[in-house]
Image (cartoon, helix red, strand yellow):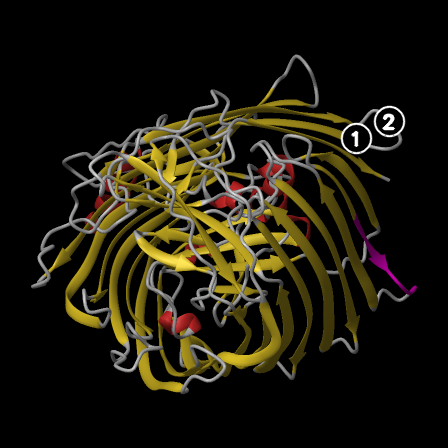
């Protein structure tokens, strides 16, 4: 039975009232009345439902996709989002299903803190900006089930349980990583209740897919369970000539060895072939808008990748004080010779020209081992509660390459925006592999979650990180080694003036390899710092978060002599506002706003005070769903996404315009039959707006996706 708590006549300290008033007024929350009398401090709010049912939301559409806990934030396990002193957003599997997402891009691009720089549809590694700093999939800023990876070209959405996005530094939590943020993909886990879900549909154009999600108990005692996801897709996308063929199989088992020991194993195989992926652009001046439906790649562009992964995890609750958790993953990626093209926009010849070029990358074979091992200890010192975690984590990545012949670059230019298509020149590659890059990142972590009382909590600790990388430019090249280590401390304070409101302040250091780590003159590790204050509120069925941050890192850049130099700082200051959940019983809203002031400071490189490339000052994005009362089971969906202008060059001479795109869709759940059926349709970029996604890639055209899901 639901219980309601009226927040009326709550007498608090002036500090807590001021924090609460500032939060509610800054969010523009309607329906809340703030009244402060001269005789005593009084806060009047309407009755809010804080029933146990409302607090169990874990990302379902019926709960407004609100998630209460994050599974893995570094070494932090199952941490309540509201009480976590960092800005974290979780995208649930039902969001993935209901938006018919073909790749994480479809989800992350609608995050108000994320600006996609290189899309998944390109031949490049996925690259995005979070808080204005790059986060790319070979940087160590990505993990799968908490296990870090240094190579993630593609991950199918069919096997994702949720996506955990940490904004800002992560050195204390994950070790060496870029300062913008960290992304952790949680895979679907075995379940003991039988599920047999089959979905067929279309991701856009003629790219049809089929997906089966199966699971259940394998014995009568419910100590052994499985999960199996099988997905296949094939056909052209909404971009002319862009064909994607993919097959993914993922199986997982869970065994409750005893009531204290649980073991899991997961194995997956993915095969992806993409023809004429989104092309890379080198813009030497401001471009005009181009047709995003047209394929601007050469007709022979091909990328083929096969990924095999096996992972295991064991948890052991030794007693009421100690517990151990460990995990390990081995991944092999085999990527065939990549045939890519790029387009150069230039006025170097006195006219505005478009020059196509050929790019050839020899075959790659990537072998990777990832691990973590943590000991959690729960104990009290007097009235103070501790959850102390100590442990090890790391990743070992061997990137084997093959030698390729030098291919002549095609430089015949045409007047902008005419693209000249040309035949693929003859080329050859070697089958002999050599160790191109061998990178090891290892961490030693100690962290304590200290609960002083029901209102105050401290999170403190440090991570010692080592970076050991060896690089060879060719099979006969001389190996170049980079071996550095640093410690990244962190301190956070959480204050909860009311059960539904948390405020926090945090400090963290981060570390990453210095510029030119594969050159003869590498720079020492770059140490970044972040100060952040914020507040999180459970308002009805929504979680609303406000965060103010200040991130500072060394400015490393490539000189005209093709060597790296460190001169000055890059400082990003901003504010984020996000919300997710039910506004009313019928209306769901997810979205937010990011205001960013990013500048290069204290530098002698001639760009003092300039804004970094591909960093918009404003992003505002909102997605909503409304249940139509007149037609039970019918839900209308829509989204509007604004991204501000972005500079093309470090000198800030050229800029891309801002853009706004919109989505519309609907979902119809038919539950009157023995077998429930859900019909979905989404139209992305409904106006078919042509726009530049970033200085390197065009945006996506209008895409109509639909699916039919049956639960047997």
The overriding secondary structure of the stretch rendered in magenta is: strand
Say few, some or many: other residues with alpha carbon within 10 Å of mark 2 (under 14 / 14 to 19 / 20 or more).
few
Above-or-below relation of 570 to 147: above
When asked about the image quadrant of residue 528, the answer is bottom left
Cα gap from disc 2 to disc 1, whole angstroms: 8 Å
Label 1 crowding class (10 Å Cα cut-off): few <14, some 14-19, many 20+? some
- Asked whether, in this view, residue 85 is left or right of residue 49, the answer is left
In percent of width and height, residue 424 lies at 55, 49
Residue 554 appears in the picture as rendered: no
Total labels drawn = 2
Q: Closer to the camera, 28 or 277?
A: 277
Q: Which mark is residue 673?
A: 2
Q: Quadrant of residue 483?
A: bottom left
| Res 471 → quadrant | bottom left
Quadrant of the image for the C terminus?
top right
92 or 53, nearer to the observer:
92
Q: Is residue 489 left or right of residue 271?
A: left
* Residue nearer the viewer, 683 or 636: 683
- Local SS, label 2: loop
* Residue assigned mark 1: 677
Residue occupying image coordinates x 47% and y 84%:
476
Q: Which residues are magenta?
A: 213-220
Q: Quadrant of the N terminus?
A: top right
Measured from the top left, where is residue 381 in percent x and y? 41, 82
Q: Is residue 354 magenta?
A: no
- Labelled pair 2, 1 in contact (Cβ < 8 Å): yes
In the rendered structure, the answer to whether residue 30 lies left or right of residue 583 reads left
Which of pointers 2 and 1 indicates the residue nearer the eye?
1
Residue under the image location 60 percent in, 59 percent down: 186
């Amino acid at each position: 039975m639901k219980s309601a708590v009226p927040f009326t006549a709550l007498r608090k300290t002036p500090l807590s009232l001021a924090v609460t008033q500032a939060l509610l007024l800054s969010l523009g929350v309607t329906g809340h009345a703030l009244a402060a009398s001269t005789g005593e401090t009084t806060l009047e709010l309407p009755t809010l439902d804080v029933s146990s049912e409302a607090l169990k939301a874990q990302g379902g559409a019926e709960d407004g996709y609100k998630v209460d806990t994050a599974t893995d934030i570094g070494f932090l396990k199952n941490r309540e989002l509201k009480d976590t002193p960092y800005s974290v957003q979780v995208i649930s599997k039902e969001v993935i299903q209901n938006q018919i997402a073909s790749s994480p891009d479809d989800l992350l691009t609608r995050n108000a803190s994320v600006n996609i720089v290189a899309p998944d549809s390109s031949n490049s590694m996925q690259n995005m900006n979070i808080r204005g700093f790059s986060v790319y999939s070979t940087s160590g800023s990505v993990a799968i089930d908490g296990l870090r990876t240094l190579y993630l070209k593609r991950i199918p959405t069919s096997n994702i349980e949720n996506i955990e996005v940490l904004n800002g530094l992560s050195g204390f939590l994950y070790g060496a990583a870029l300062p913008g943020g960290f992304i952790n993909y949680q895979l679907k886990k075995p379940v003991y209740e039988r599920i047999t879900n089959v979905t067929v549909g279309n991701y856009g154009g003629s790219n049809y897919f089929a997906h089966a999600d199966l699971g259940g108990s394998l014995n009568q005692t419910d100590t052994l369970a499985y999960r199996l996801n099988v997905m296949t897709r094939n056909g052209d996308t909404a971009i002319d000539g862009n064909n994607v063929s993919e097959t993914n199989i993922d199986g997982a088992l869970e065994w409750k060895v005893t009531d204290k020991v649980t073991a899991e194993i997961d194995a997956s195989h993915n095969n992806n072939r993409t023809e004429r992926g989104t092309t890379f652009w080198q813009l030497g001046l401001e471009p005009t808008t181009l047709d995003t439906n047209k394929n601007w790649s050469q007709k022979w562009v091909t990328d083929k990748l096969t990924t095999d992964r096996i992972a295991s995890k064991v948890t052991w609750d030794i007693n009421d004080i100690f517990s151990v958790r460990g995990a390990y993953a081995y991944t092999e990626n085999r990527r065939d010779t990549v045939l890519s093209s790029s387009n150069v926009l230039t006025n170097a010849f006195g006219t505005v020209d478009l020059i196509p070029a050929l790019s050839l990358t020899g075959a790659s074979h990537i072998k990777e081992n990832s691990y973590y091992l943590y000991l959690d200890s729960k104990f009290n010192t007097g009235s103070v509660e501790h959850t102390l975690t100590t442990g090890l984590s790391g990743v070992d990545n061997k990137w084997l390459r093959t030698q390729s012949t030098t291919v002549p670059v095609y430089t015949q230019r045409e007047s902008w925006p005419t693209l000249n298509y040309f035949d693929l020149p003859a080329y050859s590659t070697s089958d002999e592999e050599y160790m191109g890059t061998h990178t090891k990142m290892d961490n030693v972590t100690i962290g304590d979650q200290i609960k002083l009382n029901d209102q105050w909590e401290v999170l403190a600790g440090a991570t010692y990180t080592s970076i050991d990388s060896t690089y060879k430019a060719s099979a006969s090249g001389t190996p170049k080694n980079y071996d550095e280590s640093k410690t990244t401390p962190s301190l956070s304070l959480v204050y909860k003036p009311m059960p539904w409101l948390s405020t926090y302040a945090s400090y963290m250091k981060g570390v990453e390899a210095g510029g030119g780590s594969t050159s003869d003159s590498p720079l020492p590790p770059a140490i970044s710092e972040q100060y952040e204050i914020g507040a999180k509120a459970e308002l009805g069925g929504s979680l609303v978060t406000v965060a103010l941050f200040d991130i500072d890192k060394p400015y490393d850049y490539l000189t005209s002599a093709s060597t790296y130099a460190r001169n000055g700082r890059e400082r990003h200051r901003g504010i984020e506002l996000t919300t997710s959940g039910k506004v009313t019983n019928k209306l769901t809203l997810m979205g937010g706003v990011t205001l960013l002031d990013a500048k290069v400071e204290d530098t002698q490189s001639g760009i003092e005070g300039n804004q970094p490339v591909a960093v918009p000052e404003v992003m505002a994005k909102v997605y909503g769903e409304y249940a139509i009362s007149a037609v039970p089971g019918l839900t209308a969906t829509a989204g509007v996404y604004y991204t501000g202008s972005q500079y093309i060059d470090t000198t800030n001479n050229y800029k891309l315009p801002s853009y706004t795109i919109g989505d519309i869709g609907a979902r119809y759940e038919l539950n009157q039959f023995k077998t429930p059926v859900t019909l979905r349709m989404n139209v992305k970029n409904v106006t078919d707006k042509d726009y530049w996604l970033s200085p390197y890639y065009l945006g996506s055209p209008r895409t109509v996706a639909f699916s039919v899901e049956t639960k047997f």
